Image (cartoon, rainbow, N blue to C red):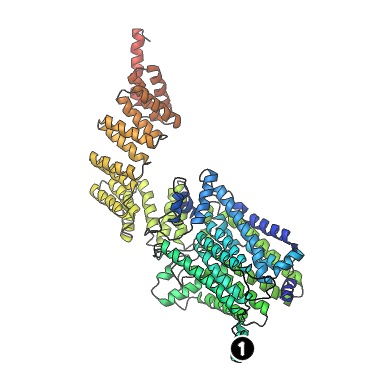
Amino acid sequence: MAHLDSSLDDDLPLFLLSAFWARSVVGFLALLCFARSYDGDFVFDDSEAIINNKDLRGETPLGDLWAHDFWGTKLLSNVSHKSYRPLTVMTFRINYYFAGGLHPVGFHVVNIILHSIVSVLMLDVFSILFSGLSYRCRSRRTNRAHKSSLLASLLFAVHPVHTECVAGIVGRADLLCAIFFMLSFLSYSKAFPENQKEAGAFSTSWVLLSVLLSAIAMLCKEQGITVLGVNAVFDIFMICKLSVFELLNNVFHRVKTAETIGLNGKKGFLCRMFLLSSGGVSMLYVRWRIMGTGPPAFTDVDNPASFAESAFVRVTNYNYYYSLNTWLLLCPWWLCFDWSMGCVPLIKSLSDWRIMTLVAFWFCLIGLIWQALCSEDRHKRRILTMGLGFLIIPFLPACNLFFRVGFVIAERVIYLPSVGYCILFTSGCSMLSKQVRNKKLIAAAVLGMLSINVMRCIVRSNHWRSEEQLFRNALTVCPLNAKVHYNVGKNLADKGNQTAAIKYYREAIRLNSKYVHAMNNLGNILKERNELQEASEVLSLAVQIQPDFAAAWMNLGIVQNSLKRFDEAEKSYWTAIKHRKKYPDCYYNLGRLYADLNRHIDALNAWRNATVLKPEHSLAWNNMIILLDNTGNLIQAEAVGREALELLPNDHSLMFSLANVLGKLQKYKESEALFLKAIKTNPNTSSYHGNLAVLYHRWGNLDSAKKHYEISLKLDPAAPGTKENYSLLRRKFEQLQKKGTV
């Protein structure tokens, strides 16, 4: 094995580095490639996994993390995606704690460091794969990193397809999973004696540690369990040195020896396989029990091929997806945050030219498999086998063969399979170098490729710094993706550019006529622009397509209320509540409808429901106080106001409403204190100064009243009622001057 190893390194036209400098270079390049994203925003899936995830907050018990999915939803819920990654969520919570809140810099920095750690770990992993277990003895003796493992590690560190995992904070699941995946593999390799004189000898402790680390990897991301399969392949082909070529030859010649099956140390091998398989089965069983023994629910827009009725369409498109994933590893130039909703149109007939990509994919894959299994060069055979093992096995959970997945292509899921690509690429470089006399050409090509990848990572990391850049770049890659247009529109709407947002929402609906979320958002904008009739039509279509879409029902109710179609509005609100029982915003809007209809008791009950479901619902509290105030129920209004301020002590609008009530109850001191506190919190609101002036006017503090009337009119010269009250005050001053009392 030593001879074969040295020949592999001799063929690569790279310089030798010490182990220390090899780790330093790999780690530094991994940091350099993605450092541009360190001060980026929370983007795309970060909103649900981090910003809206209550599991990050201190008030959520730690135990809840073990009963919730990655997005903070109860695993037993029908809407849960069943992604169980409590250890990853725990690291988000730690980030949140030390950063003192939702500050993205700390989250991004941790991701960048984690990728650097994974890249450095790859040096040891690749050394084992390219050199065998004996690398540990030689590496201690020479203190040199193998050129083959250095090249493969550099390829991994700077691969642009990793940008989503590193620059997108939710990609931390893949990074943490990769760390424990590699530690599990390294632990398994340590189970065998360095000299390998006894093939059956192994350390049970290291094997069990490997199984434990695989369980930890699985708690970071489900893909982590696949390391058990990689370890099994490593055992069969690298430890037991199984040769399919020799096995077939022995069987053909009817050689019945202990080595016929190719498994030296059969008893030890069977014991190890039992430990790996029993560990894997146990993990899957526990995982199945935790997720509620039911798979997640996906729709045809998430993964259209899996919903196709034709077996031909399903199989063909699955294989097309495999070829696209392979292409992203080979040429990671066209990268997109989302590949669903028309980004990859279905292949529906043999006349589609994309069928040729499937042929090319399987031609190359079968060729590699044949070389891996039947090549006469043992060292080449084992390297190719492990390369294919790392490429295929971690990808199996995303291949749609065992269960439906919720995506077409996801760049995050090929973070681990890219290890196999790096092995195969390095092996190919070595074989090519044997055929080329001028080694400098190969060196220049490799250096050029690494440089291009570094620049591509830096550019792509910049795309991930903000949603606007990320979404707009995706338009150039996937112009047929309705979700891309939807996200561009949403981003524009959040910035107040409603006209442009409408354009993108309409395009999203054109590309996907059943895109109810785009319809809902479009309806909201049309409602705000007072284009009520079209808003009603768009929202009505959304609830026809998806009858349980509670948000669309509520928004439809708001539009119907504005159109004076009160009975229809009430029905829409109650339909929304039927489909989402805990819907405080809908109760709030229902209360507004009842208030417009002078159904005051119903309005108060609806707003009270809103505050019970969401105690921090300031608008519902405020409306209760104002309604009770306007109907003369001042004592009740005071009680509700005090209750609200106990829950929301810094809400200036509640201070203002309660101050008005206290003023009418002639509790002038308390009223003044609340007015002044509200003004201190929000000093530029005209009505705050105007109503405080009225209080002073009633109280007889005319100088203070005059001062705040003037501030109110300065802030808003057209403030309703303020001019009249100020005129009354001035006339009173004139009367007092005539009497000589001023």
Q: Position of residue 512 (x, y in %)?
A: 40, 62
42 sits left or right of 296 in the view? right
Quadrant assignment for the C terminus:
top left
Q: Quadrant of residue 718?
A: top left
Q: Is residue 348 visible?
A: no
Question: Which residue position holds label 1?
Answer: 250
In the rendered view, tell whether residue 235 sits above or below residue 523.
below
Give 127 or 336, whichever is nearer the viewer: 127
Q: Quadrant of residue 540?
A: bottom left
Q: Quadrant of residue 147?
A: bottom right
525 sits left or right of 145 in the view? left
Q: Position of residue 537 (x, y in %)?
A: 31, 55
Q: Secondary structure at mark 1?
A: helix
393 sits left or right of 382 in the view? left
Q: Is residue 499 visible?
A: yes
Query: Badge 1 local density, few (<14 within 10 Å), some, or many (20+)?
Result: some
Give 624 or 489, whichever is nearer the viewer: 624
Looking at this rendering, what residue extends furthest in the bottom direction? Answer: 253
Q: Position of residue 518 (x, y in %)?
A: 40, 56
- Amino acid type assigned to the residue bearing label 1 in the image: Asn
